[in-house]
Amino acid sequence: MSDVSCANCRACCCRLEVMLISETGVPERFIETDSWGGQTMARLEDGWCAALDRDTMLCSIYEKRPFICRQFEMGGYECLEERGANEIIP
C-alpha cells in the first residue's frame, strides 16, 4: 500500500501533458488548442499545469478536471513512476 496522499503528493502528475479527449467542463482559460485542433491542458512556462493552485499544490478545477486526470490513480503505478522520476519518495 502506498503512503501517497493529497497532503504529500506534490502534484508530480501536474507536469505531464494532458490531452483533452472528453468534455468535463474544463474552463476555456486552461485549454490550449494546436494547429490541428487538438486540445491539451495549458501549462505555464515552467511546465506546470495552469490549473494547479501553487499555494496548495492542489487542482483548482478538481470537480471539472479532464478525464485522464480522473483516471490517474493516486498511489497507482503511473503515480509512483512519476514520483520516482522526480525523486519524491512517499
Image (cartoon, rainbow, N blue to C red):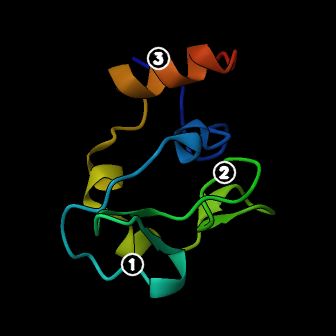
Q: Is residue 61 above or below residue 29?
A: above
**Amino acid type, mark 1:** Val
Q: Which residue in the rendered view is the most extreme toward the front?
A: 35
**Distance (Cα) linking label 3 and label 2:** 18 Å
Which mark, by number, is residue 81?
A: 3
Where residue 90 sits in the image (x, y, percent)?
Answer: 62, 20
Residue located beneath label 2 in the image: 48
**Amino acid type, mark 3:** Glu
Q: Quadrant of residue 4?
A: top right
Earlier along the polypeptide chain: callout 3 or callout 2?
Answer: 2
Q: Is residue 39 above or below residue 77?
A: below
Q: Quadrant of the N terminus?
A: top left
Task: Name the one closer to the observer, 55 or 90.
Answer: 55
Residue located beneath label 1 in the image: 26
Earlier along the polypeptide chain: callout 3 or callout 1?
Answer: 1
Q: Is residue 65 above or below residue 90?
A: below
Task: Name the one closer to the observer, 89 or 19.
Answer: 19
At x 61%, y 44%, the residue is: 11
Q: Quadrant of residue 39?
A: bottom left
Where residue 34 sits in the image (x, y, percent)?
Answer: 40, 64
**Distance (Cα) linking label 2 and label 1:** 16 Å
**In the shown orientation, is residue 83 left or right of residue 45?**
left
Where residue 49 sits in the image (x, y, percent)?
Answer: 59, 57
Q: SS of the residue at dot 1?
A: loop
